[in-house]
Image (cartoon, grey):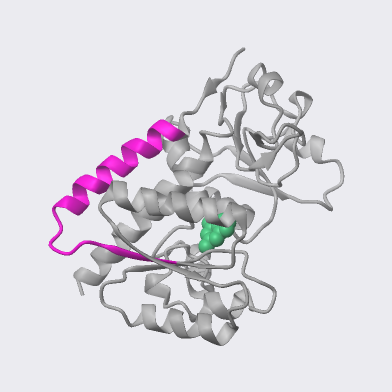
């Protein structure tokens, strides 16, 4: 068997084109404030990509680059200003923040209706209850991709490897809301292979190159690789051994070109949704 490779890049382009079309009909351009503290190279790339996505979608990006030694009070003052700014519909504070700043305090300061990352505890609680204003971008991207390829999680056994607040936990919840039976595995799970082998849909979000080998995948399973690692050659790769797993799985996401571009497209969708919500008030 050779798995269908799910084209996250192509689907993200389609989603962004749809957003651009919807935005072009709006009287007021949606606005996204992006706050980056410090000069972490990976974060700089992420932020640059977000700015590019905004431009493609017709969303106004308000870019704030603050120095590494910015205090928590200064970040909180900017967040408050963005909360009160009429032109701004969504606020994204790029993580990680420098060590002098408490991430939790900053994320909780973002107005929940402008929290397009869906990291605020109110939005996390809403996700638990199936009442989310916004779905967190990476889990939402995973679900969009499954839908696009006609993969219905209902009645399936989904195994999510990784329990982060950003990916593992919310992805498990979105799958549950679509009637999957969900197992969450993590670093303390004994016999990870035994669990993975049970999965009809296997989602891996750990950040460990080569973690998922072909003998851990049930024949015909759907494999979603959320991780972004760098291999010995400095090339991007996921947690899944791609070529061997292709021989076992029915569908698989590549890295790069799978979940990553979908995450970015979902941020644009959330920003569009945020502006719609505010306009309709
Ligand atoms: N850093 C890595 N991923 C993310 C993300 O999805 N949102 C934010 N705000 N920061 C991140």
- Residue 257 pos. (x, y %): 51, 33
Q: Quadrant of the C terminus?
A: bottom left
Q: Find residue 165 and report its image quarter.
A: bottom right
Point out the image quarter for the N terminus.
top right
Please check the rendered image and state whether residue 93 is part of the magenta-colored stretch, yes or no: no
Q: Nearer the viewer, residue 153 or 240?
A: 240
- Where's ligand 1: which quadrant? bottom right
Residue at left 56%, top 51%?
Answer: 171
Instruction: Give the main secondary structure of the magenta stretch.
Output: helix
Q: Which residues are magenta?
A: 9-34
Q: Position of residue 36 (x, y in %)?
A: 51, 66
Residue 81 quadrant: bottom left
Q: Is residue 177 visible?
A: no
Which corner quadrant of the image does residue 112 belong to?
bottom left
Q: Nearer the viewer, residue 250 or 89?
A: 89
* Above or below, 155 relative to 71: above
Image position, residue 82 (x, y; %):
37, 77
Question: Height in image: 262 above or below 235?
Answer: below
Position above or below: 114 against 244: below
Q: Residue at x 36, y 53 (%)?
A: 268
Q: Is residue 127 left or right of residue 86?
A: right
């Amino acid at each position: 068997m050779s798995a269908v490779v799910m084209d996250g890049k192509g689907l993200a382009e389609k989603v962004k084109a749809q957003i651009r079309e919807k935005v072009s009909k709006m009287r007021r351009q949606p606005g996204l404030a992006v706050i980056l503290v410090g000069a972490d190279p990976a974060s700089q790339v992420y932020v640059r990509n977000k700015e590019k996505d905004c431009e493609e979608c017709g969303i106004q990006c308000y870019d704030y680059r603050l120095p590494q030694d910015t205090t928590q009070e200064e970040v909180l003052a900017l967040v408050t200003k963005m909360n009160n700014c009429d032109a701004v519909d969504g606020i994204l504070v790029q993580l990680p923040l420098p060590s002098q700043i408490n991430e939790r305090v900053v994320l909780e300061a973002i107005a929940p209706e402008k929290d397009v990352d869906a990291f605020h505890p109110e939005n996390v609680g809403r996700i638990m209850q199936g009442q989310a204003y916004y779905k967190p971008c990476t889990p939402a991207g995973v679900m969009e991709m499954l839908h696009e390829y006609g993969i219905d999680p209902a009645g399936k056994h989904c195994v999510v490897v990784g329990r982060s607040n950003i990916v593992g936990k919310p992805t498990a919840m979105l799958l549950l809301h679509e009637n999957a039976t969900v197992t969450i595995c993590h670093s303390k799970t004994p016999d990870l292979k035994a669990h993975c082998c049970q999965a009809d849909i296997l989602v891996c979000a750990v950040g460990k190159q080569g973690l998922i080998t072909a003998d851990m995948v049930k024949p015909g399973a759907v494999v979603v690789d959320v991780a972004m690692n760098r291999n010995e050659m400095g090339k991007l790769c996921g947690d899944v051994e791609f070529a061997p797993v292709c021989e076992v799985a029915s569908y698989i996401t590549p890295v790069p070109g799978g979940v990553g571009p979908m995450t970015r497209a979902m941020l644009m969708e959330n920003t569009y949704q945020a502006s719609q919500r505010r306009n309709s008030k």
